Amino acid sequence: MLYLIITVAVFSCNLLIHLAIPGEIWYSTAVKRLGGPAMARPSAETSVAEDFNRELLGKGGWNMEKQTRRQFLKTVGLAAASGWTLSTLPTLAIEQAGRGKKRPNIIVLVTDDMGYADTGCYGAKDILTPNIDSIAQKGIRFTNGYVSCPVCSPTRAGLATGRYQQRFGYYGNAQSRVGLPLTEVTIADVLKSGGYVTGAVGKWHLGLSPQYHPFKRGYDEFFGFLAASHSYIDPQLDTANPIMRGTEPVNEKEYLTDAFTREAIAFVERHRRETFFLYLAYNAVHAPMQAPQRYRDGFQHISDASRRVHAGMLTALDEGIGKFLAKLRELALEDNTLLFYVNDNGGAPGNSSSNGPLRATKGTMYEGGIRVPFMIQWPSRLKGGQVYKQPVIVFDILPTAAAAAGAELPKDRKIDGIDLLPYLAGKKKTPPHDVLFWNTGENHAVRQGNWKLVSMGGEVGLFDLSTDIGESRDLKTEKADVFKEMQDVFKDWSSQMPEPLAVPRQRDTTGSKKARPKKAGKDRLKENRK
């Protein structure tokens, strides 16, 4: 009987909280246990009661359904012994919910096919990007920031797992037709296990089949598309690759960059009282080259017509990022939000992007293919306006985020990324990485210190990036000992990697005979999980 009375009393207190403070109470917890809704919740507010349960009664919240009668009475007894009464619970809940969080919210903001010198903070003169630049002003800008592949999908696989994607056979975009192997643990898996609400907005490009959907890879919510690209203005052009809310196609009528900004803002508003992780992957400025109507006649100071279209797309992107950052400030979330900004590869050859002083473009192993705009911002922890010159790489994001969140990394596999926080705070003075590797199967590169070995299109060269960022002077003859050493380093590393994942054969309409791709070596795949 006593158990029933206390249960009713506690339920009544939570009901009072619900009446006093707009928003959902138990819905947020319930949907998380069921695997998450699409990209929608019935209220813009999140649960103050859930905050109270998590903060006052333990990391996992107070789950009455799983408590025995004895455990329940013990919990209430401890609360009473601590001076809590049922009449004060609502006040305590409100006060506790208003206190600052110790763990940061985490955002990974990805852009697509942008050139190294397309933003103001990386040298652009013809296009203004004040909002992207503000991340450099409030955060830290990397001048030797790299992706793990010069094309889209493998880079995202490296980012998602904190590992060289070659460890699981993911060498090129072709592997996206297979999907990120289900044996891999993603950044969303890691943070969700640490108590974060997780959401993905934008381009996925890590597998089209249902088993590779973001819902299966650690995300509670998803709004975006699954393939490599999408029309910005006409969804009917991509009926086989629809915009999806969760798993259901939607008829999105807004300019796609604006739509992704809208959904990202809505996610933050819904979860502002929870600790959240948002993967916001814009597809701008990837083809098709379609600027919004409002910029069709703009940028007349740019003589190249295709560059003007690029400028319109990039300006819309910058505006969207600005609105998103403004929302973080409005909700008083910016100071304790760890935000990463990175582009997925170098500027593409067909979108009028600018890689500035770097050689070549997306798809190559030269700096123009793999060195990208890359920044980090966490105002409450990291001093803004800094420039960090040591090489860092996209798969450093996962271990850095996990360290900030207090989340555990998987212990049954090799994590290649490094927690950058001690380096950025000045506690560690050495470079985070001794050597970095890139390999698409046909082409490869190695960076060790300032030396870079490039094997591209059958040509092999050695460059000193400290004096030759444009990779114009091949020193392999002059520095034959360095050249040989770096070749040996690459051979040793690549010998530990499995062959590429076998991809489905595409229908051959040319009449030619194509060899089937080799199957990945199972033993080496298994070994590289360690």
Image (cartoon, rainbow, N blue to C red):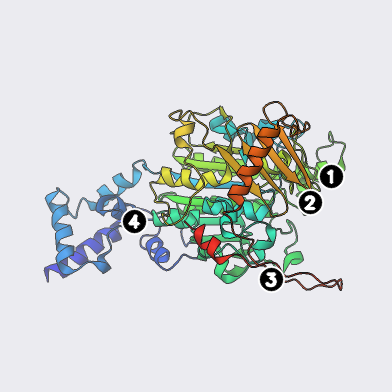
- For disc 2, the marked residue is 289
- For disc 3, the marked residue is 504
Vertical placement of 297 versus 49: above or below? Answer: above
| Nearest to the observer: residue 428 or residue 193 | 428
Q: Is residue 421 left or right of residue 491?
A: left
Vertical placement of 435 versus 191: above or below? Answer: above
Q: Amino acid at mark 2?
A: Met
How far is disc 2 from disc 3 in space, using C-alphas?
29 Å
Q: Residue at x 71, y 44 (%)?
A: 365
Q: Amino acid at mark 3?
A: Pro
In this rendering, does residue 343 appear at all? no
How far is disc 1 from disc 2 in space, using C-alphas?
8 Å
Q: Is residue 412 left or right of residue 500?
A: left
Disc 2 to disc 3: CB gap under 8 Å: no
In primary-sequence order, the first of circles 4 and 1 is 4
- For disc 1, the marked residue is 306
Q: In the picture, which quadrant includes the N terminus? A: bottom left
